Amino acid sequence: MRIFSYLNKSFQYTFVNKSALKTSRKLLGICSAGLLGLVTLVMPLSATAQNNVLFVSSNETSNLGWNGYVTNARDAFSSVAPTGTFVNRTGGLSSTTSLASDIASAKLLVLTTVCSNTNPDRWDEVQAALMTRPDLMVVSFVDGSTVGQCPAHLERFTTAINSIKPSSWGTITATPTTGNITANLNPQSLYASTFQGVLSTIEGQYWGRMSSVPSDYALYTRATITSPIPATTDDAYGLFIPQAASNGGNGACLFFVADASQFSTTIGIQPTQSNNIGKAFYAAATDPA
């Protein structure tokens, strides 16, 4: 398989060299599974991912407001999923029932958590997929509030991010932060053009402030990143990790926002904001070019 060895080295270079990555995006989507699109030319169909869009959340039925976050997030992504592909596992992250088979059948996993209790075993299943599924796209909204289980959820997912990030990155931290935020699309982001026309800002509150995020991979920030461009930002609201860089090319493509309040019925213009989030993130995660 000499040709695949050569191509894999090319993809590794593509990530290391920023300008090469920006150019190559026209040839290979950042969430494309490394060699997957090429390997499927010679591999059987069963080796590829299924087509399901899997929605998983914490169980927030005990809190009307938090449950509204989950409902709006679910509705936003169910409306953009192709007919017959949406799998609803609302509350599944808090359940004793395994999610493994659902995750195995998913092309896109949408994870939304607020501040109620979750099951550590379900988190383990999500992290295992992040680390071992190069054919999977993950879009995750983990609320950064200071109350309830939100700090623990944010810490758990940040740990997962650090398990798949490139070794050249510093350790990503996320600090629960109070107050309102208008998060700005980072114009330096490699995905800025995908989001610009639909979601240039996100309104939220009680969010997770991420630090040590490389500026090119910070998707949204509190303050707009301007020249001279810093190597990293300590003000990130959202980030992404390309598949080719996820766990050395063995992991899933990840889009992450350290907030779920943007889906609240009382924040921003709803359901417009929620629906635009669904459209923008679905388009980015499934963009083949």
Image (cartoon, rainbow, N blue to C red):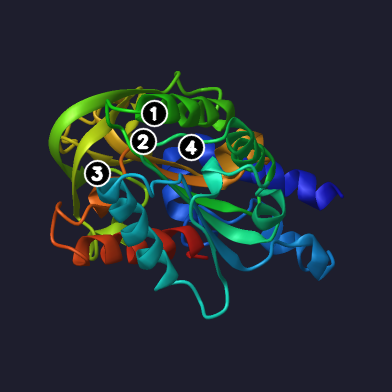
Dot 2 amino acid type = Cys
Disc 4 target residue: 17
Q: Residues within 10 Å of mark 3 (few under 14, many from 20)?
A: many
Q: What element carries label 2?
A: loop
C-alpha distance separating marks 3 and 2: 27 Å
In front of the other: 282 or 79: 79
Residue visible at 58% across and 44% down in the picture:
95
* Label annotation for residue 115: 2
Looking at the rendered image, the disc whose residue lies closer to the viewer, 3 or 4, is 3
Mark earlier in primary sequence (2, 1): 2
Q: Is mark 1 on a helix, strand or loop?
A: loop
Disc 3 target residue: 186
Mark earlier in primary sequence (1, 3): 1
Circle 3/circle 2 CB separation < 8 Å? no
Q: How crowded is mark 2: few (under 14 residues within 10 Å), some or many (20 or more)?
A: many
Location of residue 145 in the rendering, given as x and y in whole percent from the top left corner? 27, 31
Query: Residue 101's image quarter?
Result: bottom right
Residue visible at 59% across and 45% down in the picture:
252
Dot 4 amino acid type = Asn
Q: What element carries label 3?
A: loop
| Res 234 seen here | no
Disc 1 target residue: 149
Looking at the rendered image, the disc whose residue lies closer to the viewer, 3 or 2, is 2
Location of residue 3 in the rendering, given as x and y in whole percent from the top left corner? 80, 52
Circle 2/circle 1 CB separation < 8 Å? yes
Looking at the rendered image, the disc whose residue lies closer to the viewer, 4 or 1, is 1
C-alpha distance separating marks 2 and 1: 5 Å
User: Going by the image, does 9 lie left or right of 258?
Assistant: right
Residue 266 to residue 233: above or below:
below
Dot 1 amino acid type = Gln
Q: How many marks?
A: 4
